[in-house]
Image (cartoon, coloured by chain):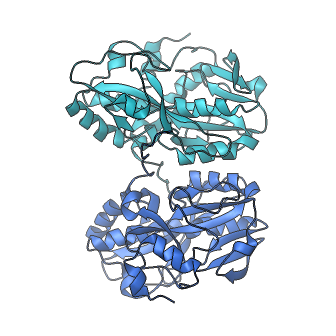
Chain colours: A cyan, B blue
Amino acid sequence: MVTPHELRHSSAAAVRQACRRGLWRAPTAGLALGYVQANLVIVPADWAFEFLLFCQRNPQACPLLEVTEPGQTEARLTAPGSDLRTDLPAYRLWQHGECVEEVTDVSSYWREDLVAFLLGCSFTFEAALLQAGLPVRHLEQGRNVPMYRTCLQCHAAGRFHGPMVVSMRPFTPAQAIRAIQITSRYPRAHGAPVHLGDPQAIGIADLQRPDYGEPVDIHTGELPVFWACGVTPQAVLLQARPPFAITHKPGHMFLTDLRDYDLQDCFTPVIASSV
Amino acid sequence: MVTPHELRHSSAAAVRQACRRGLWRAPTAGLALGYVQANLVIVPADWAFEFLLFCQRNPQACPLLEVTEPGQTEARLTAPGSDLRTDLPAYRLWQHGECVEEVTDVSSYWREDLVAFLLGCSFTFEAALLQAGLPVRHLEQGRNVPMYRTCLQCHAAGRFHGPMVVSMRPFTPAQAIRAIQITSRYPRAHGAPVHLGDPQAIGIADLQRPDYGEPVDIHTGELPVFWACGVTPQAVLLQARPPFAITHKPGHMFLTDLRDYDLQDCFTPVIASSV
């Protein structure tokens, strides 16, 4: 095994190699700082158009970084040389919407009809918030971010529909304004918040009882600020119950070669290359 | 028939109605100023995933505004109440990559498996350039913008692959810098240029012989500046020769309810709505 210290300032490729060689099986937060970490969702080709359409229609919850061709195991555009079957520390296998197994390598489950979706994640904008000197409460408290199902409906696409899941971070009004400015610059890492203030206005009854993650303290004078969350596509996907799907295990993300800075653009600019 | 003057400051919905009633059959440039005009591409469902993937991978050439479900005739998200079969002034019908007919209504050709793609167009960023006081040469000269096939390769997706087509506008260096700033703000209207200066570096032999559109004058001290062009997806699509496709007739665009200002974001923000 390698230590977190060794991978903290390594390249994304080194983290992928460590996973591939079985040397890293833990969450990826704090590894290869500055590189973009991605959510992974893999579905059969006959579900892929509808899922891609769902992502296209709900880009705050599902910011697309890359989508593979059926059967393609490499993230060619965002992580050349990668192998999506081996380069994450842990995966979950799903059948008809139920998690049936957690594994560290999906090579033996691979099929020629599988399409992989890499989606931006909140690690990117949290790094930017911290760099701007804003406190991120769940990190301060050493907890998982609190997440809530809302009454905000995603735009449906084929068999995929359902409520938006949001993550919450408390801020003073002045901090909230700054946090909105900063996260607005990261459209491919969920972008600007979708709501702030009254939780009931978006169907959240009790902030101390999140649907996912853990509650955090909210101090006097602070507002809860809500961002579209990467749990949304997973929740919607699993509710649609495709016969087979693969995702990353929560917190065990895929490391791309993109830099956090790249997600300030809504797409990776074309690098001129001749025929 | 209605006059251009009547539709110049009308709503997008009024232009769609005029088309639907057969009262407008001409190009849409200059109509419903401030509203976003869109390129239209319609393909059968079994080609839709690959085309969506192509757009997702080549967002500068193919900025997605909306994609419909198979058989859906309304652009529900960007033009509620619209009918994509009747609301454009003119369409082209394609079979195996050949244009077989131009029509003003595609209702009788509609099929339950058709998927429509609405893509941003350069009208939006040209309006912004003009508002910023920059001269747009082809408009000054009353010509169609010159467009060129390049040696820049698009990212392939399934059966879709080919070179990027670019449009060119000449500017002084100071104007070019300003034009880059302004168009960078419109990621869903092709965004920033992909090249400036030496045409041969991107495989263009002679600026006075464009592959599409008309040549324009380039004054001493001006640089050619090149943007990814909405002709790219059409060229790539037709080269792939799907058995059937529908597009708008060039210049005869679909009017959405989006405002030009909206394309400064890489997606239309979620409007909070409860269940």
Q: Is residue B158 above or below residue B148?
A: above
> Which residue is found at the position 42% from the left and 34% from the top?
A202
Q: Quadrant of residue A162?
A: top right
> Which residue is found at the position 39% from the left and 43% from the top?
A264
Locate the N terminus of chain A and report the quarter of the image it occupies. top right
> Which residue is found at the position 58% from the left and 81% from the top?
B21
Q: Is residue A174 above or below residue B160?
A: above
> Which residue is found at the position 27% from the left and 23% from the top?
A135
The answer to whether any part of residue B251 appears in the image is no
In the depicted view, which residue is nearer to us: B177 or B158?
B158
The answer to whether any part of residue B96 appears in the image is yes
Q: Position of residue A183 (x, y in %)?
A: 35, 38
Q: Position of residue B68 (x, y in %)?
A: 62, 56
Q: Quadrant of residue B162?
A: bottom right
In the depicted view, which residue is nearer to us: B185 or B88?
B88
Give the number of callouts.
0
Q: Is residue B113 left or right of residue B166?
A: right
Q: Position of residue A251 (x, y in %)?
A: 52, 21
Q: Position of residue B40 (x, y in %)?
A: 59, 68
In the depicted view, which residue is nearer to us: A111 or B85?
B85
Q: Quadrant of residue A34?
A: top left
Locate the C terminus of chain A and report the quarter of the image it occupies. bottom right
Q: Is residue B273 left or right of residue B128?
A: right
